[in-house]
Image: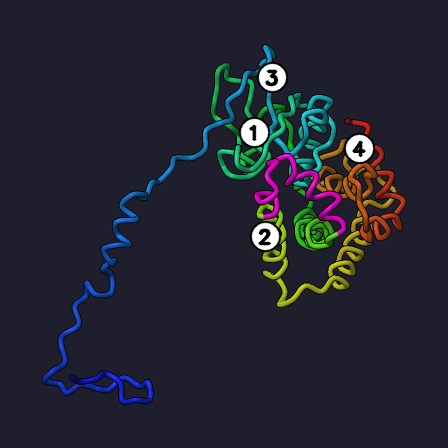
Amino acid sequence: MTSDHDGRGIPEQRPESRREPRRTWDFFSVPAPVKRVFDCFPLLTYPPNDLPQCTWPTRRGNRLFVFSDAAGAQRGRPSFNPQCLKWQAYLKFIGIEFELVPSNNHASPSGVLPFLLPALPVGTSTPIPLNKMQKWAIEEVHCEEEQQLDLRFEVYLSLLDNRVRNAWLYHLYLNQENFDAVAQRLYVDPSTNNSTVRSILSSQLQQAARDELLKSSSYIDVGALEAEAAESFDALSTLLGDNTHFFDRPNPGLFDASVFAYTHLILDQKMGWRYNRLEKLLSRHENLIKHRERLLKFF
């Protein structure tokens, strides 16, 4: 009997005359027992998610699907999610009426919230996804988004979408006190009563936030995140100055909604924050606090 090993765990080279040609299918063939298991569970490609099925009220207005609880949606309260609140506020600012519908990402046809189901044309079942919501809104009210015409718009918006958002992600999801008191209550507990599933969802949320922060840095530096958020608030305060709205616009626009989405939730005591360093940084700027108070009156 011959051996393929030389006694030291190193494969022994066979003479060329005895070497068998390697067949391509060897790499891809599946052992019969494994194949029988997978044959019981054939691969399926599912279609995009359908819209949530429920009995709607007799009213046929626009319906905005956001992260919210039933009571908050019924009263039109601000969403507890910055992305949802941004568009909820923007639609209010430009005069579009809508009903709030509590929802989650799994119910969204695009996989993210918010999305909107328009009232017209009557009987439509085609939702307006997040990336088309502003275009739809402008066409509805025939307005022009003046703030976006300012060359500084994209520069300052990047402060919110990057620096402020990163600090928000850390404080909500990776600060364990806040996660237990806020994120767990708002995002995890309403999803299921099963403790095992809740634990899995919690881990997934925290890992997703961690992965997002590590895209721009090799490690998570909390001090750096807070310093960048402080610099962003300084810049936004300077930009607003003594004006009522950003870019000296007579009415609040998309940028005002974008700022409000964070400043309101950071300052909102009903969120239940246990550790809120962002509130301390934001509270240094009285004009940003008054800006938030003015816009809150829309709700």
* Residues under numbered marks 1 and 2 in contact, where contact means CB atoms less than 8 Å apart: no
- On screen, residue 161 above or below 130: below
Residue 294 position by quadrant? top right
Residue 233 percent location from the top left of the image: 80, 51
How many numbered discs? 4
Amino acid type for the residue under numbered disc 1: Trp
Disc 3 secondary structure class: loop
* Residue ID for mark 3: 61
Residue 295: numbered disc:
4
**191 is within the stretch colored magenta:** yes
Answer above or below: position of 248 versus 51. Answer: below
Give the Cα separation between the discs numbered 4 and 1. 22 Å
Q: Which residue is mark 1?
A: 136
User: Outermost residue toward the front?
Assistant: 1
For residue 55: magenta?
Answer: no
The disc, 2 or 3, on the residue closer to the chain's N-terminal end is: 3
Q: Label 3 to label 4, Cα distance in Å? A: 23 Å
Is any part of residue 145 visible from this angle? no
Q: Nearer the viewer, residue 223 or 26?
A: 26
**Mark 2 element type:** helix
Magenta stretch, overall SS: helix
Q: Range of the magenta residues?
A: 177-199
Nearer the camera: disc 2 or disc 3:
2
Q: Is residue 295 left or right of residue 134?
A: right
Dot 4 crowding, Cα within 10 Å, few <14, some 14–19, many 20+ = some
* Secondary structure category for the residue under label 1: helix
Structural distance between the alpha carbons of marks 1 and 3 = 15 Å
Classify the position of the N terminus by image quarter: bottom left
- Say which label, 4 or 1, has the lower sequence index: 1
> CA separation, marks 4 and 2?
31 Å
- CB within 8 Å, label 2 to label 3: no
